[in-house]
Amino acid sequence: MFAKEKIDQILDSYKDFKIATICSHSALQIFNGAKQYGVKTIGICTEKSRELYESFPYAKPDEFIMVDDYSKIPADELVEKEAILIPHGSLVEYTGDGIEDLAIPIFGNRSSLIYEKNRDKMFEWMEKSGLKTPRILKPDEIDGPAIVKFPGAKGGKGYMVVNNPEEYYSKVKEGAKTMIQEFIVGVRAYMHYFHSFDGEAGYKTSYGRVEMMGIDRRMESNADEIARQLSVGANIPISFTVMGNQSLVLRESLLPQYMEMARGVCNSSQNLFGGMHGPFCVETIVTDDLEIYSFEISARIVAGTNILETPYSLYTHGKDYTTGMRIAEELKEAFNKKKLKEIIY
Ligand code: AMP
């Protein structure tokens, strides 16, 4: 892991800062948000993606750094340009374990991404946060619908549902490293939060405040269109490849619980790895008796924030607001107060 002290030294050398990220996932939102706060942006881009990222005048980066391959982040060049890297799902995926060693300031705490990437650690984190989680099963304990997750699967691709140990053994290659979870039936709600070191909105945590930004529901194929296939008599196994996102509002009686959950996640993150800063998401399913199960934490901006946030960000910030804007505002605030080191690693 690249030492925090070295990141602090790099930050000490910055006279100003720019926002940089890989041109993928939520980059348009991040660049657009930065523009609205007058922060300059750098897009790390491949030739293939450049045309797309040049085609949105209000969301294109001020400059591009061209790369052949997103797994190779040009750290020296970025540091020279006084960049702060914003992690998103593609960045975490492309850099893999290499993200720990990147010699460049990353918004938030890179240790949180290590918890995000390891399902066992993530479940430990969720349990320490007081979240209710689906049962984790050994193959021989499968006693009803269970979802089988493979390592590294992104966006739910390749997951399957099995109903008993025999089905598991017949469908999953021997020795495959899987996590099997009880399949929770209910309405999914992907909660977008933002932890701020000195914000005034939201719930107090042990090291700042946590705001609710919005909620989405992922559209996954073919799970979310399953009625169509059943109605035409097709019987294709359920799958969970994410295709997009829709916004959602919750019945208000659930909100206090969701705010407490966010606080729990932040407070336990401080105990486990020194705290989490900026955007994060808790992926949940609400059952018909209104129990909330959490099955994942994403310790960074999630793609579901790309829908202009649901009214919670309006109630928090008084205007239509995006997580991209929130990131730029937070970094500016921290820069002006000389507190970047508190929220960057
Ligand atoms: P994940 O990779 O953990 O985000 O899961 C991908 C998708 O699989 C989710 O968006 C859900 O639709 C579904 N899913 C994951 N875990 C569960 C679970 N325990 N019960 C029911 N559906 C799940």
Image (cartoon, rainbow, N blue to C red):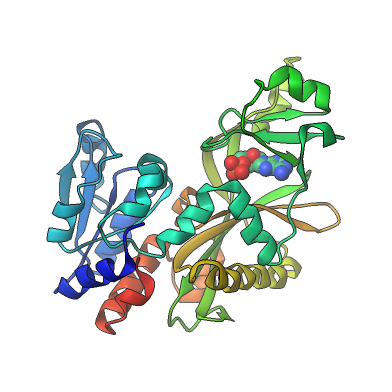
Q: Residue at x 47, y 48 (%)?
A: 303
Quadrant location of the N terminus?
Answer: bottom left
Quadrant where ligand 1 appears? top right
The quarter holding residue 46 reads top left
Q: Nearer the viewer, residue 32 or 41?
A: 41
| Residue 215 percent location from the top left of the image | 58, 57
| Residue 304 percent location from the top left of the image | 51, 50
The quarter holding residue 122 reads bottom right
Q: Is residue 142 visible?
A: no
Q: Residue at x 48, y 52 (%)?
A: 302
> As displayed, is residue 30 above or below residue 260?
above
| Residue 31 percent location from the top left of the image | 28, 56
Quadrant location of the C terminus?
Answer: bottom left
Q: Residue at x 19, y 75 (%)?
A: 12
> As displayed, is residue 335 above or below residue 62?
below
> As displayed, is residue 107 above or below residue 200?
above
Q: Is residue 288 visible?
A: yes
Q: In the displayed structure, does residue 7 sit left or right of residue 275?
A: left
Q: In the displayed structure, does residue 53 sit left or right of residue 122?
A: left
The quarter holding residue 242 reads top right
| Residue 66 percent location from the top left of the image | 17, 40
Q: Nearer the viewer, residue 27 or 145?
A: 145
Q: Residue at x 35, y 64 (%)?
A: 107
Say how many tags the image has.
Answer: 0
